[in-house]
Image (spheres, coloured by chain):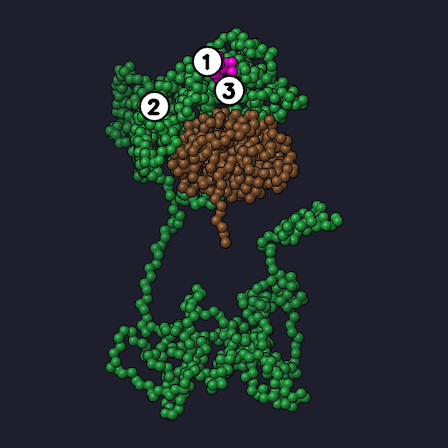
Amino acid sequence: MAFPRPRPGPAELPRRRVRSLACGQGAVRAARFNVDGNYCLTCGSDKSLKLWNPHKGTLLRAYHGHGYEVLDAAGSFDNSQLCSGSADKTVALWDVASGQVVRKFRGHAGKVSCVQFNEEATVIVSGSIDSTVRCWDCRSRRPEPVQVLDEAKDGVASVSVSAHELLSGSVDGRVRRYDLRAGQLYSDYVGSPVTCVCFTKDGQCVLAASLDSTLRLLDKDTGELLGEYTGHRSATYKLDCVLSERDTHVGSASEDGKVYFWDLVEGSLALSLAVGRGAVQSLAFHPTLPCLLAAADGHLQLWREEAFEEEEQGGDGGGHAPP
Amino acid sequence: MAAESSDSEEEDLVSYGSALPALQEGERIKKPVPLQEQTVKDAKGRYQRFHGAFTGGFSAGYFNTVGTKEGWTPSSFISSRQKRADKTVLGPEDFMDEEDLSEFGIAPKDITTTDDFASKAKDRIKEKARQIAGVVAAIPGTTAFDDLIGPSKITIGVELLRKMGWKEGQGIGPRIKRKPRRQKPDPQVKVYGCALPPGLSEGSEDEEDEYQPENVTFAPKDVMPVDLTPKENVHGLGYKGLDPTQALFGVPGREHLNLFTGGSEKTSDLLGDLRHNKGRKLGITGQAFGVGALEEEDDDIYATETLSKYDTVLKDEEPGDGLYGWTAPKQYKSKKRFETEVKYIGKILDGFFLASKSSAPSKTYPPPDLPRDYRPVHYFRPVIAAGNENYHLRKTLEESTGKLENDTTQQSRHTLNASQRRERLGETVLKGPAPSVLEYLSEKDRERLKEVKKTSEQQMKAKMLPQQSQNSRFQPAPANEALQKWQMFLGGQLANAGSSDFKPFARYPEKQKRYESFVQSLKQGQKVDTLEHYLDPSMTEWERGREQEEFFRAAMFYRSSNSTLSSRFTRAKYEDDVDKVEVPRDQENDIDDKESAVKMKMFGKLTRDKFEWHPEKLLCKRFNVPDPYPDSSIVGLPKVKRDKYSVFNFLALPEPTTSVAQATNERIQQNNLNKPKKPSRWDVSDKEKEKKDSISEFISLARSKADVQQQPPVPTTEECRTETNETLPSETANEDKDQEEESRPPMDLFKAIFVSSSDEKSSSSEEESDEEQEPTVSVINSETTKQVDLPDSSSSNVQENVAAATEPGLPLPPASKEELDMAEEFGPRLPPAFSSGPIQQQGPVVPASFPGPSRKEKHKKNREKHRTKRDHKHKKEKKKKQKKHKNKGKHRNKKSEKDSSSDTEDSSDSLSDIDTTGLSPKELLRRLKQLQH
């Protein structure tokens, strides 16, 4: 006998800083949750990649092998592999358990600014400032990319992958969506260099952050503007934007050290969190919980909703938040 | 206690399966056995076979040898005299392999009930004997218990029937009288439809009994019940698998081993019948068995299976053992039966009978013979679909190249010259010059004529020469004088030219050949007259003259390039298409329209470009997506070949959808569409709608604005910009910003090119002032931009930016610092590692072990780089400034090179740069000093 599921309560936003960890990696270039949100990866400017349990605050493993700072990383669906892109122009595929580089893909002519796995972790999609997106095959041993998407006229700042689509945001101010199923390329002009793109959870919309301090929510099929979110400051740096776990809110890092959240539908500013002093380096939102990962000032911070209670304070390896 | 604790620890863990054995130190992990080596072996270590000799396999004794380890040993001779009595009879299983006798073989040895336990109604005599024995025995009546114990094979139904007087072989039902004699069918009876074959329409009584007494009743005939089991398999109708009991005639095993228990008594009886008819004892006959070595009887070795064994007569019903078809029991064959030849062997299904008339053989048509060079794969040529939008493209292409790639062959027909056409048509070359009148003249006359001609021509040329432009290509029949001149001009250089790598007419091999011989003769210093001899005699004089000049020019060109370059280059192995270049077929069209659309927030059709895009097949496979273009070999955007130097490569093709007029149309449509929708926050306000009613008006307005902004009075724009940034709603702010983005690049470009020292100066000074923390910036900003209430954000903005790049107190390894410098090349920069907030706390963070020397080195470099006046003045300033110079300088270069990261930050920088250009160095210095206090 199944009871009807309780109606989901109002969407909560992370409001309370639960933990702050000193990563010890120099600048944290990217903080990314794994597929289920139990672990996270931080990419450091000291060429290392670290795997954390942010909920317990423990460092699990550090991965060394890149030649320059690591700019982005992603975990595979089965948590067995990692991929990372670095300023040394390579994309690396790591074995999580052994910490070894399984493969290194060379071919980008510039820094690799973003990487993503596809759903089955058979392809790594990487975007670089050489204005190409390259799709690397993890299955075969071939060193060349499966396909090079060189339509962008300027560096590719962000890529996102859905079941059958590749989304790339480029500094030439365009959001390109490659639909593999339909064999079409949709290019939406945003007007300002795009720093971050992501799909909504339902896969119907595209969120694009650009350097005119604006986040735009575009309809995937028509390219129409569904929402616009302003108030933060993003004019210089490559900053991340996120969607909350239920697509209720839109979040963005800002150069004034805050993280802003807007209501997705109304477009009104819902929350701003003071994360750090400088620009917030990277953001990641938990896939299922109101839980935010923010990287600023070399620290990794975990933010939870107000009602969240921590079970135990064991193994908090990191220092505390900077004032 | 310890154990307990460990137990409790273990309780927490849940383990599945058994643990792998721990590896020894240095032991290698065993390789998994590859699939081809995963074989099944029997007890002796041989490869296990699953088929014995009787079921398709072959198993020969000891490791595929015969018999034993020693090989085949013949059985020792046994005198038949002594052993005659107990001559053993060999059954099939004596020749079987283990595999045949195993579980899956043809004769599985399973446990079966022996006669003792089979049935009580088995052997009457034996039973009797046993009963007698029971009576006689010491303990009387014990055998009675045996009967009790013995399992019954006969079902209770059969038992009951028997008790009611039924006998095996009879039908069930009341006894009936036989019908009187069967009457002959009435010849007058008309039959409609398909008449049944005679003999089938009637019942199947035995016609043998002539006499049937009236008072005798008979048991009804045993009728096979109609089998109504549905067909569940996919075999053909009436198919029956090989039944070993029947295949082997069910004969042999009786005495030997209870092998074929399935065979019913009846069957064996019938077969026994057959056997006896043949006069054989115990038949292991047939091809499958052959004749054993110890077998005497070898009368019928081969092919005992003959057609005669099968029934050839169609009968209606037979007492049901279901055996007709396989082995026709002879007793069922009726002699009187009207015989129809059955041409096929097998059982005729219930309800079917053989057709009396054979159907007409269906005509078959053989497939057509394939041509010898036929290939069963069709390759699709990439075709540009003649769609609506492609029409324009096609047209422009045709205009630009004169032809599309597809139909070059068709069109080039017109470009062929006579000789090429001749070649294609396969005509023979005309011997010698075209038959002219000169041919028929004598030598002397010809000479004379030539001389006359020459003189007259010379006179003509002398007149015409001043009128004619020297270098017109289509100069008909160049004068000999000119040729002479050419020759003079070329002669010297050609003499020392190397081998002729230069092939100006490589496309026309014939022409090239002519050219080569021409040049050859030219080198040898032959006269013009003889030179003419190398030209194509079939051409007209005009053509010849033209070609000659062409050759001369080519030779001259060859001379000029040859000497210097020929040693450095080799000829290409593969000819590439020189004139053509691959260009994406569709291009993202002009940004201007989009820009304005973005400004008006009219995202959608106006800002969207849609292209056909071909994903790689492997990528589709990896994404588990069907290939959208399975037939195409293109990857990525489809490309077309165009003229390398065509203007169209550099122009975005104006597609009809993006023209302004169209845009307005669409916009109107969109507005119409928008109306019924419920108003959203993002809908443009009415006022603005009014303003934007005509897009052209707007664009012109925007352009004029941009023009204004490009004018020197920048501070005003800056002011308005920041103001709007802070105060106005975001929409207008965006518009302005975008406007600025549009207008700024040329500004930067101009600066980068033209403004040299003064700008450098000012920028450096500006940076230095920047580097002093917030007060500096704010002062400068307020002064330069004439902005009274400077928003806190913008000031810290600038300052942060600078601090980000140059913060001295970064606990970063030097490598990453360099990277930071590197990072500022393209696009949005990476956020600074550690930012300096408004509160300066970075000072104490500086680690003591900060790498000093490397920094100094860097500064040296920087110093070398920036030899500006300002630098001289500020040498004694803090070192970090110079580093900043470097960054800034680089940054600016980048901006001028490719400005895509147009952002307010940069713009504010650049604007302030511009502002400071007006200030004299002294003034700046004064300000700096002020600030330092």
- Chain B palette colour: green
Looking at the magenta stretch, what is its main secondary structure? helix
Q: CA distance from mark 1 to mark 3?
A: 15 Å
Q: Residue at x 26, y 15 (%)?
A: B463
**N-terminal of the two: label 3 or label 2?**
2
Q: Position of residue B507 (x, y in %)?
A: 38, 32
Disc ID at residue B699: 2
Mark 1 vs mark 3: in front: 3
Q: Residue at x 55, y 35 (%)?
A: A306
Residue type at mark 2? Ile
Tags 1 and 3 both on a single chain: yes
Residue type at mark 3? Asp
Question: Badge 1 is on which residue?
Answer: B786
Query: Which chain letter goes with mark 1?
Result: B
Residue furthest out toward the top: B922
Q: Does residue B617 appear to the left or right of B448 in the view shown?
A: right
Crowd around label 3: few <14 · some 14–19 · many ≥20 (10 Å): few
Question: Badge 3 is on which residue?
Answer: B792
Q: CA distance from mark 3 to mark 2?
A: 34 Å
